[in-house]
Image: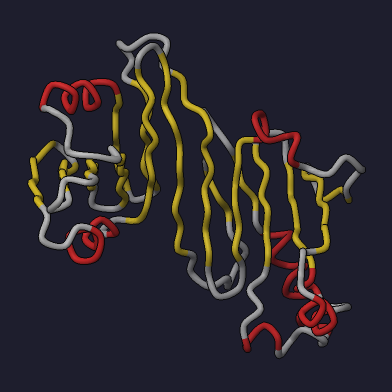
Amino acid sequence: MALTLPPGIAPLTWHAYTRLGGPSFLRAFDFAQAGQHRVIPKKIFPGGRAETFRRQGFDLVVYEAADRSDSCLVWAGPYNEATTWFGGPLPRRGYLNRVLSSVVFADAPEGATLGAASALRGLQQFGTFVYAAGEEVMLTVKDARTAREQVPSWQGAGQGEAEVWKEKLALDPEQADALSGTPYEWRYIVATSTAIVEMTFPRNPATLALARDAGGHRRVDAVVAGIRATWTV
């Protein structure tokens, strides 16, 4: 998945999720920017076990809670990382080796990839999405081929090769009244032939200052028009 942002947008922090499944194998993987796993021994598994194994281009890091109630395996690259959780004690070395031999992880400045090893047949990737958030916008990107049913049933507005919709957010009455007539009361959906992007705009003091000003509408319109995603396999 490649994401294009409009000029001048504030930096986004992103996370992603995918699953790989096949005969006698099912694993979920979380993705994040490099360094996120360092919170695990500090806040998630304090006092637990940690071990690092060096690999070409990344590290493999295993963590286990002190009471062995949970554990995880991290592919920690210099730019991005992927984590799979076991929901119990750290598995035996044989199962860990099977997980490692089933997937291929690669990291680069422009992004990370994780997929089934070429020699492993019948393993399919599904349920993938990317979530990103910043001061100006929060967005979720999904593969259009598997999430097409999530777009509205009515025809959206044309915007180049994309189709754009907006739907009212489920707000409480006080919020709905405060945001009525502003671009912040909507959820925006931009769909192309390969990707679907859902956007909302944080209602923080900086954005609310523009809520009833034409500048707020122009900025939201510019972000919706400038964000594009391309999903490749």
Q: Residue furthest right?
A: 154
Q: Is residue 152 above or below residue 215?
A: above
Q: Position of residue 21 (x, y in %)?
A: 42, 22
Q: Position of residue 51 (x, y in %)?
A: 7, 46
Give the residue drawn at x 22%, y 41%. Answer: 73
Give the residue drawn at x 67%, y 83%. Answer: 207
Give the residue drawn at x 38%, y 45%. Answer: 30
Q: Is residue 66 above or below residue 113?
A: below
Give the residue drawn at x 39%, y 48%. Answer: 110
Count of numbered tags: 0
Q: Position of residue 103 (x, y in %)?
A: 30, 26
Q: Is residue 22 left or right of residue 54?
A: right
Render colour scheme: secondary structure
Quadrant hosting residue 100: top left
**85, 38: nearer the viewer:** 85
Quadrant hosting residue 181: bottom right
**136, 99: nearer the viewer:** 99
Q: Position of residue 25 (x, y in %)?
A: 35, 19
Q: Is residue 86 left or right of residue 57?
A: right
